[in-house]
Amino acid sequence: MLDIYSAYIIRNPISSIAVFITVLPLTLTIIRKAFHDKSLRLLFCYLVIKLVIDVVMLYFASNRTNNLILYNLSIPLFYALLGGMFYFKFAGIAQRRFVLASIIGVFIFSAWDLVNSNENLSDLSEHRLVLYAKTVEGVLMISLILLYFYEIIKALQIPNLLTFPFFWVCSGLLLYYSSLIFLAPVLHYAYTWNNQMDLGITESIPSIFEILCALLFSIGIYHYSPKDYAK
């Protein structure tokens, strides 16, 4: 059985690295005790759940079993955790309400998109990626990040952004979602389980930016210090 997994990892090195590199920011979070911060605690939960889902998806993929349902279901869950980080960062009531409303909206929209993209939900072997939900998630996440950057620049309360953990977290998310926002709809048509379209290097783009995102997370978490961490 290990031969099957190792063969899959060798055939798909970039996507496999994207799975296991999550261990790096997870380990740093534990070492630096970054989960004492509410936002980074949600990030920690996101990383744990992401690692579990990614490993299960790798297991299914190596055994030639359709795993796209896990990807689809993870979209609203991941947005709730990542978007929830900004709930604790925004001071304004309007911004916090927007975060909560967007989380609820993504859950509802993702459910509709799941049904709309799959005529027969009970047939998991023919399950397809959602068409719009990932793009909507990306647009909302980028909006939250830019709004947060605007808030911290306007407030001028952070002396050095390069040592501010959440700046690196936001930078990683901005990089990842910016790369995916236009690619996500294409993946709906390309990633059909039995007839996958060959996209060449384009297929590796999400994994490459996922790796970069994890590295930026790690840099941010490394800079975390409970004593002088700016709220």
Image: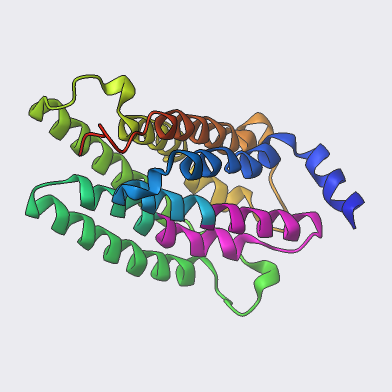
Q: Give the magenta range.
A: 49-78
Please identify the quarter of the rendering in which residue 155 is found: top left
Most foreground residue, 100 or 182: 100
Q: Position of residue 163 (x, y in %)?
A: 32, 23
Query: If the image is split into quadrants, where does the N terminus sit?
Result: bottom right
Residue closest to the eye, 177 or 231: 231
In front: 228, or 44? 228
Q: Quadrant of the C terminus?
A: top left
Q: Magenta span has 66?
A: yes
Q: Residue at x 85, y 45 (%)?
A: 6
Q: Is residue 110 visible?
A: yes
Determine the residue positioned at 8% across, 53% down. 94
Is 97 part of what is drawn in magenta? Answer: no
From the viewer's perspective, tell me whether residue 53 is left or right of residue 193.
left
Residue 162 location, quadrant? top left
Residue farthest along the bottom direction in this orientation = 122
Q: How many marks?
A: 0
Q: Is residue 128 visible?
A: no
Q: Identify the residue shown where x is 60% and y is 58%.
A: 52
Magenta segment, prevailing SS (helix, strand or loop): helix
Q: Give percent across and percent down for residue 140.
A: 29, 48
| Direction from residue 118 to residue 107 in the image, left or right | left
Of all residues, the one furthest to the front in this rendering is 227
Q: Residue at x 43, y 65 (%)?
A: 113
Left/right of residue 149 with respect to residue 194 in the rendered view = left
For the rendered model, the colour scheme is rainbow
Residue 215: x and y, percent? 51, 30
Position in image of residue 35 (x %, y %): 39, 49
